[in-house]
Amino acid sequence: MTQYLLAIDQGTSSSRAVVFDSTAAVVASAQQEFPQEYPQPGWVEHDPEEIWGSVLSVTKKALQESGASLDQIAAIGITNQRETTLVWHRDTGECVHRAIVWQDRRTAPYCRKLKDKGAEETVIAKTGLRLDPYFSATKLAWILDEVPNARQMATDGKLAFGTVDAFLLWRLTGGLVHATDATNASRTMLFNIHTQDWDDELLELFDIPESMLPQVKDSAAEYGLTDASVLGAAIPVCGVAGDQQAALIGQAGFETGMTKSTYGTGCFVIANTGETALQSRNKLLTTVAYRLNGKVTYGIEGSIFVAGSAIQWLRDQIKIIDSAEVSAAIAEASGIVENVHVVPAFAGLGAPYWDPDARGAILGLSRDSGISEIVTATLQAVAYQTKDLINAMADDGIQPSIIRVDGGMVANDWFLQFLSDILNLTVERPKNVESTVLGAAYLAGLTSGIFASTEALQNLWRRDALFEPDMKDTQRDRLYKGWLDAVARVKT
Ligand code: ADP
């Protein structure tokens, strides 16, 4: 009997489900967007029933389109938007509040208060994260403080906390399983990434009752069977990982130094650092890349707030291009731009600058600068920012070997060649650029025996294109210095 894997990707703006065959080829897929709620400036919420409803609907659709019968689905893998926080009643599965999304900044004052008390050093040492509203702990504390009676119910063991993976797992298993994986746990700010356990001192700091927390399992593990009433059969859930980690897995980034960079709206870079949890000097995050057979592999992570969205800005705001795609042809025709720099610091500067008040600028214009210079310089800016992150990683002790890229922007060959030139590294684009959902399928396939090992997954990974550095050191140095000068001009 032919066997298939079902991967669920519950993202920030949409839910997807993909059915893969045993060679990791896509058989069928479905995707559905769901509403974002902005109840106040800086607040972002999701309706848990919209999350669940969209997941159910895409899952059923993908299964149906695949033509596979339910007993041919060997296992399910889940990947998800990370850090987003849910709390639900153990008896009914109903949430006590809408999901507080990772982008939500409502707990900034609370984080500041804890920082003033000197708590950040402990948080960094134990979790590898910064004391920031981004992560789950202060969002969870907010729900316990603000929802009437929540703290009492939590103390009485009546409430469960989870990131989106745990919530989906609970619903899929009909409330039988309350678990998460080590990658998702590592983003809560309650999990000690060195001991691989929920941390008493952190639970006390954020005032969280331990009884609310899910069990933490390997990323590839037997999580439990779906309740037959949900999808029509009992199917084992066998893999879970947060979206960026799943992308690293989908890129088969299993060796120390292997790095994946996802270019969507923003850009997320994770380098595999092996058994070593590097402590960053450059405000990068230390994270669990994956945990397999009880063995933790760590990663170091940095993000760029504005990547593909800078191209959208060219298209929608200043309206100098009709589509994102034409940016490649424009850059091809213009060639590398030496003197014009676009600094897309629309939402401040992230790692390694961490300047939330900086704003964007176009520098170095002369009488002959035009649309093509600005478009090309914008593509170059995304590459320079990647170099900023890679340099920070190198300074922290991990020199990336190969960069594997994915996300919407990597359709742009000109951008990838420039990226390779400016990084002075090999850049590889896979055949399947949907690395996140593929990573979830890989994990499910490892547990269920469809894939024998991570080595087998490395053999499955297929390259679409390879970009090798082909730029003189002098030009690379000159260009990058120009970028650093431009950044210095926008810093506050
Ligand atoms: P997300 O998952 O964050 O929604 P995607 O991975 O779908 O993002 O990528 C979409 C982004 O990629 C958009 O911001 C778009 O501007 C950018 N993009 C798409 N095609 C190109 C291209 N050929 N060149 C440059 N940028 C592109």
Image (cartoon, rainbow, N blue to C red):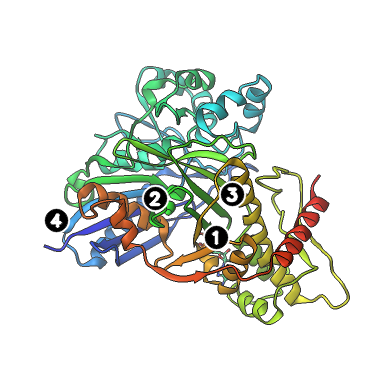
Please tell me which of labels 2 and 3 falls first in the chain: 2
Residue 94 in view here = yes
For the residues marked 2 and 1, what is the alpha-carbon distance in whole angstroms?
A: 20 Å
For the residues marked 3 and 4, what is the alpha-carbon distance in whole angstroms?
A: 40 Å
Residue at 29% across / 66% down in the picture?
A: 25
Q: Secondary structure at mark 2?
A: loop
Confirm or reject: label 1 Cβ below 8 Å from ligand 1: yes
Query: Amino acid type of disc 3?
Result: Ser
Q: Is residue 63 above or below residue 321?
A: above
Residue 336 sits in quarter: bottom right
Q: Is residue 372 above or below residue 435?
A: below
Residue 31 sits in quarter: bottom left
The residue beneath circle 1 is 263
The residue beneath circle 4 is 71
Residue 233 shown left or right of residue 457 in the figure: left
For the residues marked 2 and 4, what is the alpha-carbon distance in whole angstroms?
A: 31 Å
Residue 303: assigned label: 3
Please tell me which of labels 1 and 4 falls first in the chain: 4
Farthest residue, direction front: 473
Please tell me which of labels 3 and 4 falls first in the chain: 4
Query: Amino acid type of disc 1?
Result: Tyr
Contact check, label 2 and label 4, Cβ < 8 Å? no
Residue 15: x and y in percent read 40, 55
Residue 403: x and y in percent read 51, 58
Binning the other alpha carbons within 10 Å of mark 4 as few (below 14), some (14 to 19) or many (20 upward) gives some
Please tell me which of labels 2 and 1 falls first in the chain: 2
Query: Amino acid type of disc 2?
Result: Phe
